[in-house]
Image (cartoon, rainbow, N blue to C red):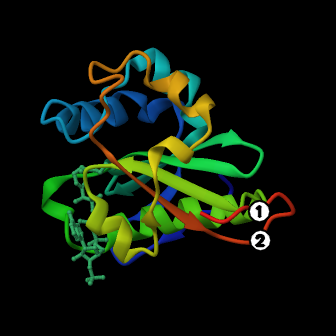
């Protein structure tokens, strides 16, 4: 991700190698509460270029990733913010940074599997039948303890009418 976004307290920037342990700690905090899927340190290295972080005073306080799935489709994953900062608009900024990157990559649709459907609805995502998502996305779910009975909601945000555009 190319851009860095500053707000009054901190900044959103692409993740770096030195962030991996802090990203893992934040992610596992919420994974242990069943709010998001756990990820190994190894998986974080594999996907580090997907991640952006919100950094404040040198500390990683928020994370979000954009994973390319298919020719016109990407997924928002691993969105989390430390509890003290929840409700301060930073979650929205993290998602919007990922959407900006999707636009710059000419990706027309971004989806999310989440327990926070209302948050994503506020950001312009609409409900989507999981069965209509490409089969490829489920390959990443094979190691999930809930597979195949995923109880997360699927939502999608249409960004543009790509040549391969199809209705949500
Ligand atoms: C979900 C999360 C990232 C939201 O970030 P946040 O910074 O608290 O959210 P924001 O302040 O940017 O909220 C944007 C809007 O969504 C609303 N909102 C935030 N969380 C919400 C939720 N759980 N349900 C419904 N609405 C929510 C806010 O009230 C705000 O509405 P407004 O525009 O009318 O003022 C954050 O609460 C979090 O880290 N939760 C724990 C981990 C988690 O569940 N991650 C989701 C994995 S997909």
In front: 133, or 101?
A: 133
Q: Mark 2, residues whose alpha carbon is within 10 Å: few (<14), some, or many (≥20)?
A: some
**Toward which corner of the image does residue 146 lie, by quadrant?**
top left
Q: Between residues 1 and 35, which one lies in front from this camera angle? A: 35
Query: As rendered, which of 149 and 82 lies closer to the eye?
Result: 149
Marks 2 and 1 sit apart, C-alpha to C-alpha, by: 5 Å
Secondary structure of residue under mark 1: loop
Q: Look at the numbered disc 1 and say if its residue's Cβ is closer than 8 Å to ligand 1.
A: no
Is residue 47 toward the left or the right of residue 29 in the image?
A: right
Side of 140 where 23 appears, left or right: left
Residue under the point 77% across and 62% down: 165
Mark 1 surroundings within 10 Å by alpha-carbon count, few (fewer than 14), some (14 through 19), many (20 or more): few
As drawn, is 12 to the left or to the right of 78?
right
- Kindly identify the residue that appears in the image at 38 percent across and 55 percent down: 55
Seen at 46% across and 62% down, the residue is 95
For disc 1, the marked residue is 165
Q: Tell me whether the residue at label 2 lies in contact with that at label 1, contact meaning CB atoms closer than 8 angstroms.
A: yes
Numbered badge on residue 161: 2
Work out whether 147 lies above or below 109: above
Quarter the C terminus occupies? bottom right
Question: Picture quarter containing residue 37?
Answer: top left
Left or right: 113 as drawn, with respect to 35: right
Residue 113: percent from the left, percent from the top? 39, 46
Q: Nearer the viewer, residue 58 or 62?
A: 62
Q: Residue at x 72, y 61 (%)?
A: 166
Position of 157 relative to 39 (above/below): below
Report x, y in % for residue 75.
54, 47
Asked if 61 appears above or below 100 in the picture, the reply is above
Residue 25 image offset from top left, x and y in percent: 26, 31
């Amino acid at each position: 991700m190319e851009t860095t976004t500053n707000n009054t307290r901190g900044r959103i920037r692409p993740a770096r190698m030195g962030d991996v342990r802090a990203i893992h700690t934040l992610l596992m905090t919420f994974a242990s509460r069943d709010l998001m899927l756990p990820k190994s340190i190894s998986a974080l290295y594999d996907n580090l270029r997907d991640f952006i972080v919100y950094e404040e005073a040198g500390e990683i306080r928020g994370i979000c990733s954009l994973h390319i799935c298919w020719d016109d489709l990407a997924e928002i994953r691993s969105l989390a913010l430390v509890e003290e900062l929840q409700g301060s608009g930073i979650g929205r900024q993290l998602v919007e940074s990922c959407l900006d990157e999707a636009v710059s990559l000419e990706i027309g649709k971004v989806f999310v599997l989440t327990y926070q459907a209302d948050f994503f609805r506020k950001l312009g995502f609409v409900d989507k039948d999981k069965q209509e998502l490409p089969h490829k996305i489920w390959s990443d779910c094979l190691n999930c303890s809930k597979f195949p009975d995923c109880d997360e909601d699927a939502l999608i945000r249409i960004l543009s009418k790509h040549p391969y555009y199809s209705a949500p």
